[in-house]
Image (spheres, helix red, strand yellow):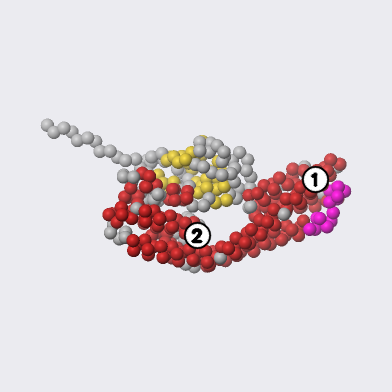
Amino acid sequence: MKKFTLSIGELVSFCKIVRDNLARDLATFKNYKPKYVQAFIDALSLRIKDLTNLVENKIKIGEEKQMTEEIYAEANSLRPILNKYEGYVEDAAKVAPLSVPVTSFRFKEVRHEIGTKDMEQLIIEVQTNWQMIDDNLDPIKDQGYTDAMHTAYQDLITDIDTRNATRVQKIEEKESIVLQNIDFLNGMYQDCMNICADGKRIYKFTDKDKLKDYTMTAIRRKITQLPASDSKALKTDATITGRVTDFETENPIANVKVWTNDNLKGVLTDANGVYKIKVNSKTVKMLYAQAEGYTKYEEDVEIDPKVTMVMDIELEKPEVVAPDAPPVA
């Protein structure tokens, strides 16, 4: 059973970042626990190399990347076709009423999904587009659209769908190979989390900047951002998601309010501490979280449009200051 919320690819990056932070702070860690010596880092590096080979070589990322690029290229080939076919539809609508408005043919939505590279949603939209044309075939053919175009369009859509299904199946098959080594993956994650826990103990009251380097929030921000799968991008064109946990115990916290400067209403975390909030990439600047018994969390945010950013949040309980001792009589 997988015991971490990171993706398999993110786990490699996570372990490398933790290893590099530890190497930088080795002298301080050694003063805390004698096990932290260069040999410890060397052994960790060898295990990270094995992890990298497991993820990258067995999954054959190059092969998967090539398949993905070919599908994206075929999807882009739809653009000139859409421009021409949209002209036929608009001209037909000027002559006689169609079964639905021109906007219902989903030309705009198909172009949007080509841009987002969400193949599953693109296939749904382009199949809808083809069906709308098919439902109004005669008046559209009067404007120059032909049966040959219609058949070729359907064949192209089918080919994209088939290629994508093959790609998804390949990814799932290869991920299952990796997951056969789940004990090793869980062990790597736990060992690196133990290093982070020691880093928090060392720097919590001595160095706030280095403390952040051992929090999941800061580490996740260094890992590659994930593409969004949202099909519609209106005023909110990006997403921030993550997990809220207790800084000390690392347990998830439910019913935490999470909000941003441009989404003051915010959302509440679920039973697993997970939140997901829609934002506007142009206006969002700050992410906030607040729960009873914890210090308010706030973090700067920079996010690109059409992106889902993962930001895990660790809430700290306020420090309890002991009262001054009464004067001695």
Q: Residue at point 38% right, 60% down? A: 191
Disc 2 marks a residue whose amino acid type is Ile
* Residue 254 position within the rendered picture, expressed as x and y whole percent measured from the top left: 44, 46
Which of the two labelled residues, at mark 2 and mark 1, occupies the earlier sequence position?
2
The residue carrying pointer 1 sits among few (fewer than 14), some (14 to 19) or many (20 or more) residues within 10 Å by Cα, namely some
CA distance separating discs 2 and 1: 45 Å
**Quarter that holds the C terminus:** top left
For the record, the magenta segment spans 140-152
Disc 1 marks a residue whose amino acid type is Gly
Q: Residue furthest right?
A: 142
Q: Is residue 217 visible?
A: yes
Per the picture, the main secondary structure of the magenta-coloured stretch is helix
| Residue pointed to by mark 1 | 87
Q: Residue at point 47% right, 56% down? A: 13
Q: Residue at point 45% right, 56% down? A: 14
The disc placed on residue 268 is none
The residue carrying pointer 2 sits among few (fewer than 14), some (14 to 19) or many (20 or more) residues within 10 Å by Cα, namely some
| Residue pointed to by mark 2 | 8
Q: Is residue 43 above or below residue 83?
A: below
* Residue 210 position within the rendered picture, expressed as x and y whole percent measured from the top left: 37, 47
| Residue 33 relative to residue 302: left or right | left
Q: Quadrant of the rendered structure where residue 328 is?
A: top left
Q: Describe the element under mark 1 as helix, strand or loop.
A: helix
* Residue 298 position within the rendered picture, expressed as x and y whole percent measured from the top left: 44, 40
Judging depth in this view, the residue of 1 and 14 nearest the camera is 14
Q: Is residue 273 visible?
A: no
